[in-house]
Image (cartoon, rainbow, N blue to C red):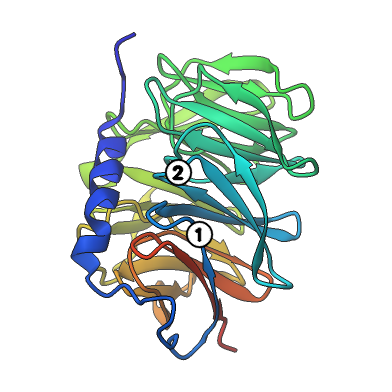
């Protein structure tokens, strides 16, 4: 089968491959941690922790160069489960309805579905193709092959509808499903009541390789250009001028504690006030990686030194 690997995924792989060498600041596990880092959890050396998610009383960490999904206890800061997911990860983890969805790296792409109660893989969706799954309206919204978004029942994991629209990145804002086609930058609004596209727009090219995020019903778009923006109530894209280092590879937002959290350098994650777009605090990291908020902390994946740091959130 001919690969339809989005150019965004090619950037992901290339950036992660060199992240450790470029960062140059990876800390040996024996070195004293920076102020504010209350714990460091080690993963498989060279595994490249990729996406981090907080759900079901745990922190979940995918690996870009290993086929293991880690489950970490926020009570002990230790790995409590290592789940063999069969493939390396690309894209971001999604949680909902008792399950974790992990986009995998192969050709074509697919998604691995993990039961959070049993800590095991329950399905591999081989006709999926993308970086991000939407969760809401009683369903999973899964990027499919041939420019489609599949609506998947969270219990049976069967496809109940197919929307004919491109969207390798998908999110749900509480009312609508949003799908961004990473090939041409077309952002589409899907009405889940009708399983139909109700509105579309084409984003500027710097936002084509982006992830979608929702905070308090507002859609946010973050790319590695670097570029950050929100979609206002009239459907206009409002750029947020946050100073950020270029060429960091994947950098989705994390949302939580009423804020946006975005990697702005190899060694820094910035907390952004969504109402003003201003950076209100910064948090340390060792190298390139993704992040998540939960359990009163910021969890930062350090791809270059194969650790996950727990940063105490400042009051």
The disc label shown at residue 51, or none: none
Considering depth in this image, is 78 or 288 the residue closer to the camera?
78
Q: Of residues 53 and 38, which is closer to you in this image?
A: 38
Front one among 309 and 209: 309
From the viewer's perspective, is 222 left or right of 128?
left
User: What residue appears at the point 70 percent right and 17 percent down from the top-left corner?
Assistant: 158
Q: Quadrant of residue 289?
A: bottom left
Write the residue at 41% across / 32% down: 105
Q: In the image shown, does 27 or 197 lie closer to the viewer? A: 27
Residues packed near mark 1 inside 10 Å, few (<14), some (14 to 19) or many (20 plus): many
In this rendering, is residue 146 above or below 172? above
State the residue at coordinates (46%, 91%). 35
Q: Is residue 196 visible?
A: yes
The image shows residue 240, relative to residue 76, as above or below, that is: above
The residue tagged with tag 2: helix, strand or loop?
Answer: loop
In the picture, residue 255 is in which quadrant?
bottom right
**Where residue 175 sits in the image (x, y, percent)?**
65, 41
Q: Distance between the residues labelled 2 and 1?
A: 10 Å
Quarter of the image with the N terminus in it: top left
Q: Residue 43 carries which label?
A: 1
- Label 1 secondary element: loop
- Across and down, in percent, residue 113 comes to 64, 32
Crowding near the residue tagged with mark 2, few <14, some 14–19, many ≥20 C-alpha atoms within 10 Å: some
- The answer to whether any part of residue 231 appears in the image is no
The residue singled out by tag 2 in the image is 66
Tell me what residue is drawn at x 24 percent, y 68 percent. Answer: 23
Q: Are marks 2 and 1 in contact (CB under 8 Å)?
A: yes
Q: Earlier in the sequence, mark 2 or mark 1?
A: 1
């Amino acid at each position: 089968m001919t690969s339809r690997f989005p150019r965004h995924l090619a950037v992901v792989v290339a950036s992660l491959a060199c992240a450790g060498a470029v960062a140059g600041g990876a800390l040996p596990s024996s070195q004293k941690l920076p102020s504010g880092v209350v714990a460091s959890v080690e993963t498989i050396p060279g595994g490249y922790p990729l996406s981090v998610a907080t759900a079901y009383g745990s922190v979940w960490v995918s690996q870009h160069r290993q086929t293991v999904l880690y489950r970490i206890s926020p009570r002990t800061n230790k790995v409590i489960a290592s789940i063999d997911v069969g493939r390396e990860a690309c894209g971001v983890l999604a949680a909902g309805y008792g399950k974790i969805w992990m986009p995998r790296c192969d050709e074509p792409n697919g998604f691995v579905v993990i039961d959070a109660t049993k800590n095991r893989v329950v399905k591999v969706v081989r006709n999926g193709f993308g970086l991000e799954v939407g969760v809401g309206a009683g369903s999973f919204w899964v990027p499919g092959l041939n420019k489609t978004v599949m609506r998947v029942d969270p219990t049976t994991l069967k496809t109940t509808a197919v929307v004919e629209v491109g969207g390798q990145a998908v999110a749900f804002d509480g009312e609508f499903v949003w799908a961004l086609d990473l090939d041409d930058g077309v952002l589409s609004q899907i009405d889940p009541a009708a399983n139909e596209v109700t509105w579309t727009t084409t984003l500027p090219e710097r936002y084509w390789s982006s992830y979608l995020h929702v905070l308090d019903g507002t859609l946010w778009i973050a790319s590695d250009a670097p570029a950050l923006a929100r979609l206002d109530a009239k459907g206009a894209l409002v750029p947020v001028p946050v100073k950020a280092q270029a060429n960091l590879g994947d950098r989705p937002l994390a949302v939580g504690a009423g804020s946006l959290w975005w990697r702005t350098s190899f060694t820094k994650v910035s907390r952004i006030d969504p109402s003003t777009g201003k950076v209100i605090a910064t948090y340390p990291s060792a190298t390139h990686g993704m992040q998540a908020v939960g359990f009163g902390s910021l969890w930062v994946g350090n791809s270059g030194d194969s650790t996950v740091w727990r940063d105490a959130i400042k009051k």
